[in-house]
Amino acid sequence: MAESLIKKYSDMLNNKEITCVELTEKFLNAIDTANKDLNAYVTVTPETALETAKAVDKKIADGQALSPLEGIPMTLKDNISTKGIETTCCSKILEGYKPIYNATVWETLSAQNAVLLGKTNMDEFAMGSSCETSCFGGAANPHNIDHVAGGSSGGVASAVGGNIAVYGLGSDTGGSIRQPASFCGIVGLKPTYGAVSRFGLIAYASSLDQIGPVTTTVEDSAIVFDAISAYDKMDSTSRGRVGAPVTDTLKNDIKGMKIGIPREYLEGVRDEVRVCIDKACEVYKSLGAEIVYFDLPALKYALPVYYILACAEASSNLGRYDGIRYGYRTSSYKDVNEMICKTRSEGFGGEVKRRILLGTYVLSAGYYDAYYKKAQNLRGSIVRAFDNSFTCCDVILAPTVPMTAFEKGSAISDPIETYLTDICTVPVNIAGLPGVSVPCGFGENGLPIGMQIIGNKFCEGTVLNAAWQYENAVGSEVFKASEYGVKL
């Protein structure tokens, strides 16, 4: 059975096998050593972490019970607002920006005395699939530092996979939690749109963005999801968790569960990925589940729909970065117009500028109907196609990414090719569905392969239970800890 690190460390704290200060110092020391290779953290917060750790130790000394996440060292992606702590989205244009408020998810975890180790690396404004568009340079894969950790939440995945954080929160706009989780051999949950508050998440594409946990086990993802999924009046799209806590639904029998596999998801994936998916199907059959293959032709529209809508929303969301209110400002200019133009040209990286230009184009007069409006109509078709799919199956099984992690530099030299790595993940965001990536094997190069389990809206319990059953059936066969970080 896969061991919950959150429960393990929580038990150690409650049983006084280790103090929270000692545990926190072990992680801070590990960050100091491993981050030279991994580049997972862009900001480390030892004062904040140790202050919280001392408060947790006092509670333990006073005989008070701890909440599930209390005292557990964790990290946040650098696009989640933290009051008084630099939050840059790994972009030069937000250099030195310290928010004056907390994101709701961090406000919630902070109230539970979660120990914040720091902010982690990411593709600039979450735009990328390798973490290499970051102004701090990309995060490395803890299984092979010559390969990328994935993106855009590459730093979170590298930190969790590299044992320099117990868990982390990332954001997923088109696969940005699930893809790096797959590359780094860990678990990444993209919740239903609206299940977790987006207040305080610096937006890329507001109708697609969703915050979710990155962990080493499925049970840990369930624990974190239960903690952060609640209605938030500050987010107009918020609905919160529907039904009982997800941790209560784990260990439910899946005998008779129908697991659907759309044939389109298997087109174009590497043979080694297809083999791992086939093996996972055999595991599910041995657990009593039924595998159902079916067609989902609407998937062929997902990638163009995603890039049109995401870039259109990005061009609008990123219009606020003008050098006037906060962040980077160019050093020399003649007037306001030149100042804004030079600030944005110098402050944004190449990938961000590409997406802003594409988004502005598809929203412009004469092209709105041809691109943006048509993409919105096709989005509706994709949503309906998934709705129909769940009439014949309980969950959908698919590859997370068509390949293992690519080598450093390849995403920069061939960005078009890396866009295609999103083909399996973007449909989930377009339809607003929950999806979790779990390790399911290794490629010929020894790097992890992930599969994703997709469910109907607000069915995180069903999705995570199916993932938990698989994880515990295969155990260490598909999970290999990296050589980095803390091991207790």
Image (cartoon, helix red, strand yellow):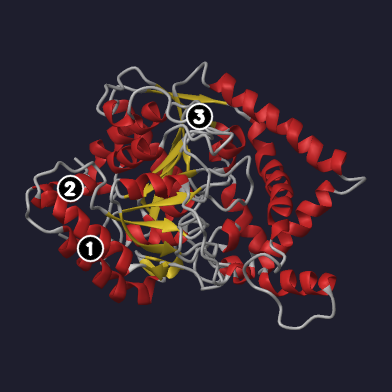
- Mark with earlier residue (3, 2): 2
Q: Are marks 3 and 1 in contact (CB under 8 Å)?
A: no
**Residue 143 x, y percent position in the rendering:** 34, 64
Question: Exactly how many numbered labels are in the figure?
Answer: 3
Give the residue pinned by disc 3.
239
The residue under label 1 is 24
Please tell me whether mark 3 sits on a helix, a strand or a loop: loop
Is residue 275 at all visible to an observer of this figure?
Answer: no
The crowding category of the residue bearing disc 3, from other C-alpha atoms within 10 Å (few below 14, some 14 to 19, many at least 20), is: some
Real-space CA distance between mark 3 and mark 1, rounded to the nearest whole angstrom:
34 Å
Q: Amino acid at mark 2?
A: Ser
Look at mark 2 in the image and give the residue it sits on.
10
Residue placed most toward the observer, 340 or 452:
340
Residue 37 in the figure: left or right of residue 318: left
Examine the rendering and report whether any part of residue 232 can be seen: yes
Question: Real-space Cα distance between discs 1 and 2?
Answer: 13 Å
Location of residue 164 by image quarter: bottom left
> Residue at the spot x=63%, y=35% of the render?
299
The residue at the point 67 percent across, 37 percent down is 300
